[in-house]
Image (spheres, coloured by chain):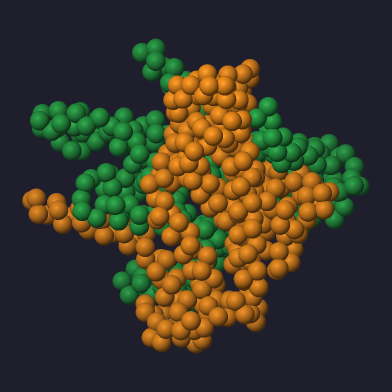
Chain colours: A green, B orange
Amino acid sequence: MLVAPALIVLAAIAGWPLARTIWFSFTDAELSDFSHYAFVGFANYLGRFEGDWDGVLADPVWWGALWNTLWFALISVSLETLLGLVFALVLAVRFPGRGMLRAIVLIPWAIPTVVSARMWGWMLNDQFGIVNDLLMRLGVIAEPVAWTADAGTALWAVIIVDVWKTTPFMALLILAALEMLPSDIYEAARLDGVRPLELFMRVTLPLIRPALLVAVAFRSLDALRMFDLIYVLTAGGSDTMTISSYARQQLVDFQEVGLGSAAATLVFLAIALVTVACLTANRVRTAAEETR
Amino acid sequence: MRLAKRIGFWLLVAAIAAFSLLPFLYAVVTSLRAGSELFTVAYWPSRPTLSNYAAVFTQQPFGRNILNSVIVAAAVVALSLALGTMAAFAFGRIAFRGRSALLAAILAASMFPQVAVLSGLFELIRALGLYNRLPGLILADLLLTLPFTVWMLTAFMRDLPKEIEEAAMVDGAGTLTILWRIFLPMMGPATVSTGLLAFMVAWNEFLFALTFTLTDAQRTVPVAIALMTGSSAFELPWGMIMAASVVVTLPIIALVLAFQHRIVAGLTAGAIKG
């Protein structure tokens, strides 16, 4: 069977480790020694320890991380969708230099995440950063802001960099959908004198909606499991911690395989839930449209 | 009115270009500045110097890091394409029981949060004796590239005409001959764009590379750049970091620009058909 090699590899590096992670989440295993551990039931998730609630679900840091992750995903995916739509609409117009602009737009997407985190870390530097300098010259702020270190702005710094990096991806997916639209509708609309905004809201947007939803679903899943950007940009401080970085911190930095695995299992469940919700919504909508 | 519209449109074009281009250009500018000059805000280097580029290769094992990344990415691309093409041939051209369920399972694997397999994979890599070694990273990275490779190649494979295959079978060609002699040449463009995306994923990968390596000499480029520190713990060597960033980014940008159309076709095929 030709499928077998790929399946065996995937089962070995995805299925088996996932099963082990879930198993470890019910044990008190530690990173230094995987061979000695005891079954502890749900204690890593939630348990009583010396009269206090213990476990991931009793940890305020976990709930902060969950809140950060949801907030980050909501804001950055919304901004990316809006900006991506604007980019795609501009790129769909025929003008001299369009090929060039299309190539330029791809650049942020091509740059490795860690590199963009470092680049923006430098630009957002409180003393020598170009962003503070520009904003002060424009009179927007009176004194330098420590963007990545200040609790109030750190998450926004992460959002800015993520939006910069992934808007091109969004724009490309939307552009592909725009280019598949039939041009005769637009001819007819132009002859009827339909206003551009109305045309966009009533014709373009409904037609590209399926592609738009797929793109939003893709980006949301990506945003929900985000790790590398914040790890490099804000050094894993709790103000910007995501659920993925919480799990890794327990696992690697604190060597708590049990707790870390419990957190990782919760991340997996959250993402699986969102995936199933997206797929079901998609199926229900498609079915509804087919029966109409 | 029309003129105002034209000007507005071109301003928008300029804004998009600036948004995409300027941050990277500023990194290039920074990489050309050295010493105390770095710690003043400037939009242009007054005395451009390549000393940061020299430093990153002499003071850091950065050449070794680049070699590591090249080895890992090349191996990941080769393995993904080999395994992916075989699987895609079966998924795309042969009807068998459970085909759509298997494809769905493979797609589900690409939705995995990386952190969910971290402890299990750590145990596996340690048990295989691959901790802090490049083969461990290659194995782990396949988790990220194999699902979408299978998926994209299957989508392309389905679009190939059935008549060719039938004609070859009439001529007495076996399955492997058909795959090797007929489909592979026709799949060239699809293979290039899939391989390129897999290369970028492996080149960028950070979480596995950070967790499964321990020493400077085994690190890949993203981890090296993320963990780069200067001679004192209080000052980050921004000039060197920017130089390293430019060095690893320029080849990727060149690749992306050269294969722009294929990447766009691949991305949209993978995302929208999937």
Residue B228, compared with residue A46, is above or below; it is below
Residue visible at 42% across and 66% down in the picture: B24
Q: Residue furthest top?
A: A291
- Could you say where residue B231 lies in the image, as x and y percent from the top left? 65, 82
Q: Residue furthest front?
A: B171
Residue visible at 50% across and 20% down in the picture: B166
Residue B194, compared with residue B233, is above or below; it is above
- Could you say where residue A103 lies in the image, as x and y percent from the top left? 35, 54
Residue B98 appears anywhere in the view: yes
- Could you say where residue B39 lies in the image, as x and y percent from the top left? 48, 82
Residue visible at 22% across and 58% down in the picture: B11
Horizontal relation, residue B150 to residue A103: left or right: right
Out of A178 and A71, give the one closest to the viewer.
Answer: A178
Residue A18 appears anywhere in the view: no
Q: Quadrant of residue A123?
A: bottom left
Horizontal relation, residue A31 to residue A129: left or right: right
Out of A37 and A60, give the one closest to the viewer.
Answer: A37
Horizontal relation, residue A214 to residue A84: left or right: right
